[in-house]
Image (cartoon, rainbow, N blue to C red):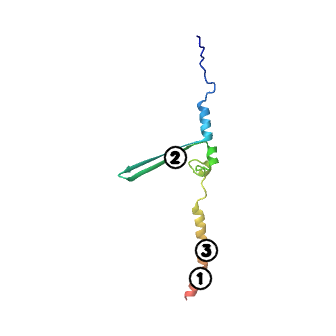
Amino acid sequence: MNDNKKLTHSTNSTTVADLLERLLDKGIVISGDIRIRLVEVELLTLEIRLLICSVDKALEMGLDWWTGNPAFDSRARITAPLPTIELEDRLQRLEARLEAVLPIIEETRK
């Protein structure tokens, strides 16, 4: 009896790049909780959530915490005009109004 058993090899191999592309496209969530209790008293609770996905997928899900953050967004690094300029302008207008009212107040005191 001659059994000709052949070894078959899979021709559909997945490369690391393919796996990473699929992972980033679909996304993956890893979550876990760590609780430290002593005599029925909870001392510490850590809730850990890790989301791995592409930026496009994150935007699709409504996650965009990096926009507007100067550490991640170069447009946010552009400094806006200092608020002190606005405050100084407002202070000058208030002082001008006060100077206009002061003679009337002094006149009523007499």
Q: Quadrant of residue 81?
A: bottom right
Q: Nearer the viewer, residue 64 or 83?
A: 64
Q: Residue furthest left?
A: 39
Tell me what residue is drawn at x 60 percent, y 80 percent: 101
Tell me what residue is drawn at x 60 percent, y 39 percent: 24
Q: Nearer the viewer, mark 2 or mark 3?
A: 2
Check disc 1: other Cα within 10 Å, few if <14, some if 14-19, many if 20+: few
Q: Nearer the viewer, residue 96 or 64?
A: 64
Q: Earlier along the polypeptide chain: callout 1 or callout 2?
A: 2
Q: Nearer the viewer, mark 1 or mark 2?
A: 2
**Image coords of residue 110 (percent x, y):** 55, 89
As drawn, 42 above or below 100: above
Mark 1 secondary-structure assignment:
helix
Amino acid type, callout 2: Arg
Mark 3 secondary-structure assignment:
helix
Between marks 1 and 3, how big is the CA–CA gap? 12 Å
Q: Which mark is residue 49?
A: 2
Amino acid type, callout 1: Pro
Q: Residue furthest top?
A: 1
Label 1 sits on residue: 103
Q: Nearer the viewer, residue 21 or 80?
A: 21
Q: Earlier along the polypeptide chain: callout 2 or callout 3?
A: 2
Tell me what residue is drawn at x 59 percent, y 38 percent: 23
Q: Which mark is residue 96?
A: 3
Mark 2 secondary-structure assignment:
strand
